Amino acid sequence: MKKPRNMFFKFLMVLLMASLIYLLWLPYVPNLKTTNPTTSSLIERRINQAEKKGKNLKPKMYWKNLNTLSPNLIHAVLLAEDDTFYQHSGFDFDQILIALKINWKKKRFAYGGSTLTQQIARTLYLSPSKNIFRKLKEAFITVWMELVLPKKRILELYLNFAEWGDGIFGAEAAARHYYNKSCSQLTEEESVALASILPSPRKWSPFKETPFMKRRRNNLLSRMPKRNSTIQEQPVFTSTSTTLTTAPENGSITNESILLELEKTNTNTENNED
């Protein structure tokens, strides 16, 4: 009897040690304070996926400092993806509760409710695997990012590495690809159109005129800072802008309606992979 028990105990110890090694094998996040990454886990994964299909993907990405990006796009992205970005410390627990309810209803892991910090942690360093160890590693990196990086730096990283289409990474590449202009020149309508496709950038288009996409863009436009308002005069990376925490109107765009649209296009939340 002792031998099987000993073997089981040894197996558990080996599993525990392997798990700890995996979790502790983390990137050195403080490097991001002063160093702009040149690639990401997501970019490398897309290149490998293309190679397996016999294609040669040449990612387009142009680094831009946050203060050179269009304030319109910054506001639109925050509203579309994480409207409590400046209030939370890496995790939006309201969204986590919503995700739990949706996933319970769907009987599967359909929605993650990730913040921008979680998304950029995953984009830069991790795979889209849904296993518990990868999720724990993402949580550790998220906490570390929030501890050592200013919010505006996290946002800058996100806007430079977010996927915006096949081989299109970052706001500048997206602006050039879709509108043939620099990101700094994007109008409010163009910014909203770009932000609206972030849940599924390889399936959705800023030019798509489906009823859902029209509602989504109109919802975001209605929540954008009003011209000549006091919000417009404030720095886009402060927490004083109440616009960023304004909730969508009832009956407009909900997490479940976004998920339903994603399922129609047979895709998962690609920039919000969980």
Image: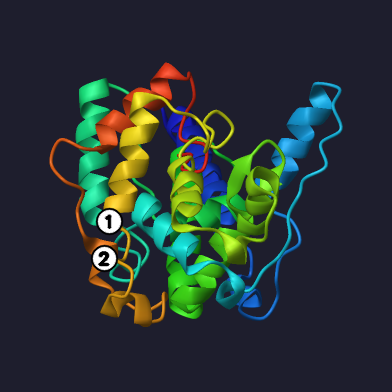
Q: Is residue 53 in sight in this rendering?
A: yes
Q: Dividing the image into 4 quarters, which one contains the C terminus? A: top left
Q: Whole-Å distance between the Cαs marked 2 and 1?
A: 7 Å
- Is residue 225 left or right of 29 when viewed as pictured? left
- Residue at the (78%, 38%) spot, across then down: 47
- Amino acid under disc 2: Thr
Q: Can the viewer see residue 240?
A: no
Crowdedness near tag 1: few (<14), some (14–19) or many (≥20) residues, C-alpha within 10 Å:
some
The x and y percentages for residue 148 are 50, 79
Q: Which residue is drawn at 69% across and 45% down?
A: 177
* Count of marks placed on residues: 2
Q: Is residue 30 left or right of residue 144?
A: right
In the rendered image, residue 182, in percent from the top left (x then y), is placed at: 67, 61
Work out whether residue 119 or residue 242 is closer to the camera in this orientation and state it: 242
Vertical position of residue 82 compared to residue 55: above or below: below
In the figure, is residue 156 to the left or right of 107? right
Q: Which amino acid does label 1 sit on?
A: Arg
Which residue is under mark 2? 243
Examine the image and state in which quarter residue 77 appears. Answer: bottom left
- The answer to whether marks 2 and 1 mark residues whose Cβ atoms lie closer than 8 Å is yes
Residue 26 placement (x, y as % from top left) = 60, 61
Q: Residue furthest front?
A: 228
User: Is label 1 in a helix, a strand or a loop?
Assistant: helix
Q: Nearer the viewer, residue 37 or 206?
A: 206
Q: Which residue in the protein does label 1 denote?
A: 223
36 vs 218, nearest the viewer? 218
Q: Report which quarter residue 228 is drawn in.
A: bottom left
| Quarter containing the N terminus | top left
- Reply above or below: 76 against 86: above
